[in-house]
Image (cartoon, rainbow, N blue to C red):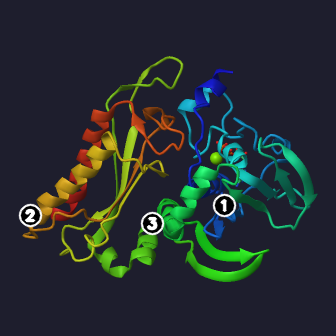
Amino acid sequence: TSTVRRISSGQVITKVEDVVKELIENSIDAESTSIEVKLVGDGLTSITVKDNGVGILECDRPAMALRNHTSKLYDFEGLSRVETYGFRGEALNSICSVTESTQITTKTENDPVAILYMLDHSGKILHAKSSGSSPGTTVTAIKLFSNVPVRRQVAKKISSSIGKNVQNLLITYALAHPHIRFSLKHTYENNSKLKFNEGNWIQPAMKNTMDAVIKLFGNELANEVQFGVWSSKSEDIENGGNDNNTEEQYIITLEAILPNPDAVPHIIFKNGKTFIYVNNRPVTTVRGEIKNLVSMVKSVYNVIACHNGWTGNTKTPFMWINIKLPTWVYDVNVEPNKNVALFHHGERLIEAVSNLLEMFYDLNNQ
Ligand code: ADP
Ligand code: MG
Protein backbone atom coordinates (compact mmCIF):
# COMPACT_ATOMS: atom_id res chain seq x y z
CA THR A 1 0.00 0.00 0.00
CA SER A 2 1.04 3.62 -0.28
CA THR A 3 1.39 3.75 3.49
CA VAL A 4 4.10 1.14 3.35
CA ARG A 5 5.95 2.92 0.57
CA ARG A 6 5.70 6.28 2.27
CA ILE A 7 7.19 5.03 5.49
CA SER A 8 9.73 2.52 4.24
CA SER A 9 12.67 4.88 4.35
CA GLY A 10 14.61 2.36 6.41
CA GLN A 11 15.33 2.38 10.10
CA VAL A 12 19.02 2.50 10.75
CA ILE A 13 20.45 0.99 13.89
CA THR A 14 24.07 2.07 14.03
CA LYS A 15 24.79 1.93 17.75
CA VAL A 16 23.68 0.56 21.11
CA GLU A 17 21.93 3.86 21.95
CA ASP A 18 19.68 3.51 18.89
CA VAL A 19 18.37 0.18 20.18
CA VAL A 20 17.72 1.58 23.65
CA LYS A 21 15.95 4.64 22.23
CA GLU A 22 13.59 2.58 20.07
CA LEU A 23 12.80 0.14 22.86
CA ILE A 24 12.07 2.78 25.49
CA GLU A 25 9.88 4.67 23.02
CA ASN A 26 7.88 1.46 22.54
CA SER A 27 7.61 1.12 26.32
CA ILE A 28 6.37 4.70 26.69
CA ASP A 29 3.86 4.16 23.86
CA ALA A 30 2.64 1.12 25.83
CA GLU A 31 1.78 3.38 28.80
CA SER A 32 4.42 1.94 31.10
CA THR A 33 5.11 3.51 34.48
CA SER A 34 8.40 1.68 34.95
CA ILE A 35 11.11 1.09 32.38
CA GLU A 36 14.25 -0.88 33.25
CA VAL A 37 17.23 -0.91 30.93
CA LYS A 38 20.01 -3.43 31.34
CA LEU A 39 23.22 -3.37 29.37
CA VAL A 40 25.51 -6.37 29.55
CA GLY A 41 29.04 -5.96 28.23
CA ASP A 42 28.46 -2.38 27.09
CA GLY A 43 25.27 -3.52 25.36
CA LEU A 44 27.20 -5.73 22.97
CA THR A 45 26.49 -8.92 24.91
CA SER A 46 22.87 -7.94 25.39
CA ILE A 47 20.49 -5.01 25.74
CA THR A 48 17.30 -5.58 27.72
CA VAL A 49 14.41 -3.19 28.15
CA LYS A 50 11.69 -4.34 30.54
CA ASP A 51 8.45 -2.44 31.01
CA ASN A 52 5.17 -2.82 32.87
CA GLY A 53 3.04 -1.52 30.01
CA VAL A 54 -0.06 -2.90 28.30
CA GLY A 55 1.76 -5.76 26.57
CA ILE A 56 1.28 -7.01 23.03
CA LEU A 57 -2.10 -8.42 22.03
CA GLU A 58 -2.00 -12.03 20.95
CA CYS A 59 -3.33 -11.15 17.50
CA ASP A 60 -0.45 -8.71 16.97
CA ARG A 61 2.32 -11.09 17.99
CA PRO A 62 2.89 -13.17 14.84
CA ALA A 63 3.66 -9.97 12.93
CA MET A 64 5.05 -7.78 15.73
CA ALA A 65 8.61 -7.75 14.41
CA LEU A 66 7.84 -8.01 10.71
CA ARG A 67 8.84 -5.09 8.55
CA ASN A 68 6.29 -2.29 8.57
CA HIS A 69 4.03 -3.97 11.07
CA THR A 70 2.70 -1.50 13.59
CA SER A 71 -0.37 -1.52 15.79
CA LYS A 72 -0.21 2.25 16.08
CA LEU A 73 -1.19 3.44 12.62
CA TYR A 74 -4.08 2.23 10.53
CA ASP A 75 -4.05 4.13 7.27
CA PHE A 76 -2.22 6.66 5.16
CA GLU A 77 -4.20 9.52 6.67
CA GLY A 78 -2.82 8.52 10.03
CA LEU A 79 0.69 9.57 9.06
CA SER A 80 -0.22 13.20 9.53
CA ARG A 81 -1.56 12.73 13.03
CA VAL A 82 1.02 10.74 14.90
CA GLU A 83 0.61 10.92 18.66
CA THR A 84 2.79 7.95 19.57
CA TYR A 85 6.56 7.81 19.18
CA GLY A 86 6.28 4.82 16.88
CA PHE A 87 4.23 4.58 13.71
CA ARG A 88 6.43 2.97 11.10
CA GLY A 89 6.75 -0.55 12.42
CA GLU A 90 10.45 -0.67 11.68
CA ALA A 91 12.34 -0.73 14.94
CA LEU A 92 11.78 -4.31 16.09
CA ASN A 93 12.39 -5.59 12.59
CA SER A 94 15.62 -3.62 12.24
CA ILE A 95 16.82 -4.78 15.66
CA CYS A 96 16.15 -8.42 14.72
CA SER A 97 18.13 -8.01 11.52
CA VAL A 98 21.29 -6.80 13.28
CA THR A 99 21.38 -9.11 16.32
CA GLU A 100 22.30 -12.75 16.77
CA SER A 101 18.84 -13.21 18.21
CA THR A 102 16.08 -11.11 19.72
CA GLN A 103 13.65 -12.25 22.40
CA ILE A 104 10.35 -10.69 23.34
CA THR A 105 8.43 -11.66 26.45
CA THR A 106 5.00 -10.14 26.80
CA LYS A 107 1.80 -10.37 28.82
CA THR A 108 -1.34 -8.27 28.68
CA GLU A 109 -3.59 -7.95 31.71
CA ASN A 110 -5.92 -10.61 30.25
CA ASP A 111 -3.25 -13.24 29.59
CA PRO A 112 -2.81 -16.00 32.18
CA VAL A 113 0.96 -16.20 31.57
CA ALA A 114 3.69 -14.32 29.79
CA ILE A 115 5.01 -15.86 26.58
CA LEU A 116 8.62 -15.62 25.45
CA TYR A 117 9.17 -15.45 21.69
CA MET A 118 12.47 -16.12 19.96
CA LEU A 119 12.72 -14.20 16.72
CA ASP A 120 14.86 -14.78 13.65
CA HIS A 121 16.68 -12.17 11.55
CA SER A 122 13.60 -11.38 9.51
CA GLY A 123 11.45 -10.91 12.63
CA LYS A 124 9.56 -14.20 12.29
CA ILE A 125 8.81 -16.21 15.41
CA LEU A 126 11.14 -19.23 15.70
CA HIS A 127 9.54 -20.63 18.83
CA ALA A 128 7.54 -19.60 21.85
CA LYS A 129 7.23 -20.82 25.42
CA SER A 130 5.47 -19.66 28.57
CA SER A 131 7.64 -17.63 30.88
CA GLY A 132 6.86 -15.88 34.17
CA SER A 133 3.83 -13.85 34.92
CA SER A 134 4.45 -10.16 35.31
CA PRO A 135 2.44 -8.00 32.91
CA GLY A 136 4.28 -5.88 30.38
CA THR A 137 6.93 -6.45 27.76
CA THR A 138 10.62 -7.30 27.89
CA VAL A 139 12.78 -7.14 24.80
CA THR A 140 16.32 -8.52 24.76
CA ALA A 141 18.65 -7.86 21.87
CA ILE A 142 21.46 -10.42 21.97
CA LYS A 143 24.91 -9.84 20.43
CA LEU A 144 24.21 -6.64 18.56
CA PHE A 145 25.96 -6.42 15.17
CA SER A 146 27.27 -9.99 15.37
CA ASN A 147 26.46 -10.11 11.65
CA VAL A 148 27.71 -6.60 10.88
CA PRO A 149 31.39 -6.83 11.89
CA VAL A 150 32.29 -3.28 10.94
CA ARG A 151 29.56 -1.78 13.12
CA ARG A 152 30.44 -4.12 15.96
CA GLN A 153 34.04 -2.97 15.81
CA VAL A 154 33.04 0.67 15.86
CA ALA A 155 30.65 0.02 18.75
CA LYS A 156 33.44 -1.69 20.68
CA LYS A 157 35.75 1.24 20.12
CA ILE A 158 33.29 3.74 21.58
CA SER A 159 31.95 1.40 24.25
CA SER A 160 33.48 3.27 27.19
CA SER A 161 30.96 6.09 26.78
CA ILE A 162 27.93 3.83 26.43
CA GLY A 163 26.79 3.93 30.07
CA LYS A 164 26.87 7.73 30.14
CA ASN A 165 25.18 8.06 26.77
CA VAL A 166 22.34 5.72 27.69
CA GLN A 167 21.91 7.48 31.02
CA ASN A 168 21.64 10.82 29.19
CA LEU A 169 19.11 9.29 26.83
CA LEU A 170 17.02 8.12 29.78
CA ILE A 171 17.30 11.56 31.37
CA THR A 172 15.99 13.14 28.17
CA TYR A 173 12.91 10.91 28.21
CA ALA A 174 12.48 11.17 31.99
CA LEU A 175 12.24 14.96 31.66
CA ALA A 176 9.37 14.53 29.21
CA HIS A 177 7.74 11.73 31.22
CA PRO A 178 8.44 12.49 34.88
CA HIS A 179 5.76 10.03 36.01
CA ILE A 180 7.72 7.09 34.67
CA ARG A 181 10.41 5.43 36.77
CA PHE A 182 13.56 4.76 34.72
CA SER A 183 16.45 2.56 35.73
CA LEU A 184 19.73 1.55 34.18
CA LYS A 185 21.91 -1.40 35.08
CA HIS A 186 25.25 -1.83 33.40
CA THR A 187 27.16 -5.05 34.01
CA TYR A 188 29.63 -7.52 32.63
CA GLU A 189 28.48 -11.11 32.83
CA ASN A 190 29.67 -14.51 31.85
CA ASN A 191 27.00 -17.12 31.14
CA SER A 192 24.54 -14.90 33.04
CA LYS A 193 26.91 -14.82 36.05
CA LEU A 194 27.78 -11.34 37.24
CA LYS A 195 31.48 -10.60 36.79
CA PHE A 196 31.50 -6.89 37.31
CA ASN A 197 28.91 -4.24 38.03
CA GLU A 198 29.58 -1.05 36.11
CA GLY A 199 26.83 0.81 37.95
CA ASN A 200 23.14 1.24 38.64
CA TRP A 201 21.19 4.41 38.12
CA ILE A 202 17.58 5.17 38.97
CA GLN A 203 15.34 8.10 38.24
CA PRO A 204 12.24 7.52 40.39
CA ALA A 205 8.77 8.52 39.28
CA MET A 206 8.23 12.22 39.97
CA LYS A 207 5.19 14.46 40.29
CA ASN A 208 6.27 16.80 37.50
CA THR A 209 9.20 17.88 35.36
CA MET A 210 10.42 20.51 37.82
CA ASP A 211 10.73 17.83 40.53
CA ALA A 212 12.56 15.64 38.03
CA VAL A 213 14.97 18.53 37.32
CA ILE A 214 15.60 18.94 41.06
CA LYS A 215 16.26 15.24 41.45
CA LEU A 216 18.60 15.15 38.47
CA PHE A 217 20.47 18.43 38.75
CA GLY A 218 19.99 19.54 42.33
CA ASN A 219 18.29 22.34 44.21
CA GLU A 220 20.78 25.02 43.24
CA LEU A 221 19.86 24.75 39.61
CA ALA A 222 16.19 24.57 40.48
CA ASN A 223 16.49 27.87 42.35
CA GLU A 224 17.76 29.60 39.24
CA VAL A 225 15.10 28.40 36.85
CA GLN A 226 11.37 28.39 36.80
CA PHE A 227 8.59 26.45 35.20
CA GLY A 228 5.82 28.04 33.23
CA VAL A 229 3.12 27.21 30.69
CA TRP A 230 1.86 29.70 28.14
CA SER A 231 -0.59 29.22 25.30
CA SER A 232 -1.65 31.28 22.34
CA LYS A 233 -3.86 30.84 19.33
CA SER A 234 -2.36 30.78 15.86
CA GLU A 235 -3.66 32.63 12.86
CA ASP A 236 -5.71 30.70 10.34
CA ILE A 237 -3.49 28.11 8.80
CA GLU A 238 -4.15 25.63 6.06
CA ASN A 239 -4.75 22.20 7.52
CA GLY A 240 -3.30 19.82 4.96
CA GLY A 241 -3.96 17.00 7.39
CA ASN A 242 -7.69 16.90 6.81
CA ASP A 243 -9.56 16.09 3.64
CA ASN A 244 -10.86 19.56 2.84
CA ASN A 245 -7.66 21.57 3.36
CA THR A 246 -9.61 24.03 5.47
CA GLU A 247 -8.05 27.02 7.15
CA GLU A 248 -7.94 26.48 10.88
CA GLN A 249 -6.54 28.02 13.99
CA TYR A 250 -4.65 25.99 16.45
CA ILE A 251 -3.45 26.35 20.02
CA ILE A 252 0.28 26.39 20.56
CA THR A 253 1.52 25.85 24.09
CA LEU A 254 4.99 26.42 25.40
CA GLU A 255 5.94 24.48 28.49
CA ALA A 256 9.31 25.64 29.65
CA ILE A 257 11.86 25.61 32.41
CA LEU A 258 14.05 28.62 31.76
CA PRO A 259 16.41 30.86 33.69
CA ASN A 260 14.62 32.91 36.29
CA PRO A 261 15.55 36.55 35.62
CA ASP A 262 15.32 37.36 39.33
CA ALA A 263 17.97 34.85 40.34
CA VAL A 264 21.65 35.66 40.07
CA PRO A 265 23.01 32.87 37.90
CA HIS A 266 25.61 30.52 39.32
CA ILE A 267 24.55 27.07 38.30
CA ILE A 268 22.44 27.45 35.18
CA PHE A 269 25.48 27.96 33.00
CA LYS A 270 27.37 25.05 34.49
CA ASN A 271 24.34 22.94 33.66
CA GLY A 272 23.98 24.47 30.23
CA LYS A 273 22.03 21.52 28.94
CA THR A 274 19.40 22.02 26.29
CA PHE A 275 16.30 19.84 26.21
CA ILE A 276 13.92 20.53 23.36
CA TYR A 277 10.75 18.54 22.66
CA VAL A 278 7.83 18.74 20.30
CA ASN A 279 4.81 17.07 21.92
CA ASN A 280 7.20 15.23 24.27
CA ARG A 281 9.33 13.96 21.41
CA PRO A 282 12.97 14.89 21.93
CA VAL A 283 14.21 16.87 18.97
CA THR A 284 17.84 15.99 19.15
CA THR A 285 18.84 17.16 15.74
CA VAL A 286 18.65 20.88 16.27
CA ARG A 287 18.13 22.56 12.93
CA GLY A 288 15.75 24.85 11.12
CA GLU A 289 13.16 26.43 13.36
CA ILE A 290 14.33 24.56 16.42
CA LYS A 291 17.80 25.99 16.00
CA ASN A 292 16.31 29.46 15.72
CA LEU A 293 14.26 28.76 18.80
CA VAL A 294 17.33 27.85 20.84
CA SER A 295 19.22 30.96 19.78
CA MET A 296 16.12 33.04 20.44
CA VAL A 297 15.93 31.80 24.03
CA LYS A 298 19.64 32.49 24.43
CA SER A 299 19.36 36.04 23.15
CA VAL A 300 16.25 36.82 25.19
CA TYR A 301 18.08 35.58 28.25
CA ASN A 302 21.21 37.55 27.35
CA VAL A 303 19.15 40.74 27.20
CA ILE A 304 17.90 40.05 30.70
CA ALA A 305 21.34 39.06 31.96
CA CYS A 306 22.74 42.28 30.53
CA HIS A 307 19.90 44.31 32.01
CA ASN A 308 20.63 42.84 35.43
CA GLY A 309 24.35 43.45 35.06
CA TRP A 310 25.40 39.81 34.73
CA THR A 311 27.93 40.31 32.01
CA GLY A 312 30.43 37.90 30.63
CA ASN A 313 28.06 34.96 30.56
CA THR A 314 28.02 33.98 26.94
CA LYS A 315 27.59 30.29 27.62
CA THR A 316 24.28 28.56 27.08
CA PRO A 317 22.05 28.51 30.13
CA PHE A 318 19.97 25.50 31.11
CA MET A 319 16.79 25.27 29.07
CA TRP A 320 13.96 22.79 28.85
CA ILE A 321 11.27 23.50 26.30
CA ASN A 322 8.32 21.40 25.24
CA ILE A 323 6.27 22.80 22.37
CA LYS A 324 2.76 21.42 22.25
CA LEU A 325 0.83 21.77 19.05
CA PRO A 326 -1.44 19.63 16.87
CA THR A 327 0.40 16.99 14.92
CA TRP A 328 -0.83 18.31 11.56
CA VAL A 329 1.32 21.40 12.01
CA TYR A 330 4.57 19.49 11.67
CA ASP A 331 6.10 16.34 10.30
CA VAL A 332 8.48 13.97 12.06
CA ASN A 333 8.53 11.55 9.17
CA VAL A 334 11.63 13.21 7.74
CA GLU A 335 14.38 10.98 9.03
CA PRO A 336 14.22 7.39 10.24
CA ASN A 337 15.01 8.26 13.85
CA LYS A 338 12.14 10.79 13.92
CA ASN A 339 14.35 13.27 15.77
CA VAL A 340 13.73 16.05 13.31
CA ALA A 341 10.54 18.07 13.34
CA LEU A 342 9.64 19.84 10.12
CA PHE A 343 7.17 22.65 10.71
CA HIS A 344 4.77 23.54 7.93
CA HIS A 345 4.60 27.19 9.01
CA GLY A 346 7.98 27.72 10.58
CA GLU A 347 8.10 31.52 10.67
CA ARG A 348 4.71 31.71 12.38
CA LEU A 349 5.73 29.11 14.89
CA ILE A 350 8.82 31.12 15.78
CA GLU A 351 6.71 34.26 16.08
CA ALA A 352 4.26 32.53 18.40
CA VAL A 353 7.03 31.10 20.56
CA SER A 354 8.73 34.47 20.67
CA ASN A 355 5.50 36.03 22.00
CA LEU A 356 5.23 33.30 24.59
CA LEU A 357 8.80 33.91 25.67
CA GLU A 358 8.04 37.59 26.12
CA MET A 359 5.17 36.60 28.35
CA PHE A 360 7.52 34.43 30.37
CA TYR A 361 9.85 37.29 31.11
CA ASP A 362 7.31 40.10 31.31
CA LEU A 363 5.44 38.20 33.96
CA ASN A 364 8.57 38.19 36.03
CA ASN A 365 9.46 41.81 35.52
CA GLN A 366 6.19 43.07 36.98
P1 ADP B 1 6.23 1.00 15.92
O1 ADP B 1 6.66 1.46 17.28
O2 ADP B 1 6.57 2.02 14.86
O3 ADP B 1 4.80 0.56 15.87
P2 ADP B 1 8.06 -1.20 16.36
O4 ADP B 1 8.80 -2.07 15.39
O5 ADP B 1 8.85 -0.37 17.29
O6 ADP B 1 7.11 -0.28 15.50
O7 ADP B 1 7.06 -2.12 17.17
C1 ADP B 1 6.14 -2.93 16.46
C2 ADP B 1 4.89 -3.22 17.27
O8 ADP B 1 5.21 -4.09 18.36
C3 ADP B 1 4.25 -2.00 17.91
O9 ADP B 1 3.35 -1.35 17.04
C4 ADP B 1 3.52 -2.61 19.09
O10 ADP B 1 2.30 -3.16 18.69
C5 ADP B 1 4.42 -3.77 19.50
N1 ADP B 1 5.33 -3.43 20.60
C6 ADP B 1 6.67 -3.26 20.53
N2 ADP B 1 7.21 -3.00 21.75
C7 ADP B 1 6.18 -2.98 22.62
C8 ADP B 1 6.07 -2.77 24.05
N3 ADP B 1 7.15 -2.50 24.80
N4 ADP B 1 4.83 -2.86 24.61
C9 ADP B 1 3.73 -3.12 23.85
N5 ADP B 1 3.79 -3.32 22.51
C10 ADP B 1 4.98 -3.26 21.89
MG1 MG C 1 8.60 1.67 17.91
Upstream in the sequence, badge 3 or badge 2? 3
Identify residue type, mark 1. Ser
Q: Is residue 41 above or below residue 11?
A: below
Left or right side of 316 for 166: right
The kind of secondary structure element at disc 1 is loop
Mark 1–mark 3 Cα distance, whole angstroms, equals 17 Å
The kind of secondary structure element at disc 3 is helix
Upstream in the sequence, badge 1 or badge 2? 1
Left or right side of 121 for 29: left
Q: Position of residue 263 (x, y in %)?
A: 20, 74
Q: Position of residue 116 (x, y in %)?
A: 85, 58
Q: Which mark is residue 175?
A: none
Residue at numbered disc 3: 209
Front position among marks 3 and 2: 2
- The reply to whether the residue tagged 1 has its Cβ within 8 angstroms of ligand 1 is yes
Q: Position of residue 15 (x, y in %)?
A: 56, 54
Q: Is residue 250 above or below residue 144?
A: above
Mark 3–mark 2 Cα distance, whole angstroms, equals 28 Å
Left or right side of 123 for 304: left
Residue at numbered disc 2: 306
Q: Nearer the viewer, residue 5 or 349?
A: 5
Q: Is residue 119 visible?
A: yes
Q: Nearer the viewer, residue 130 or 120?
A: 120
Q: Is residue 178 visible?
A: no
The kind of secondary structure element at disc 2 is helix
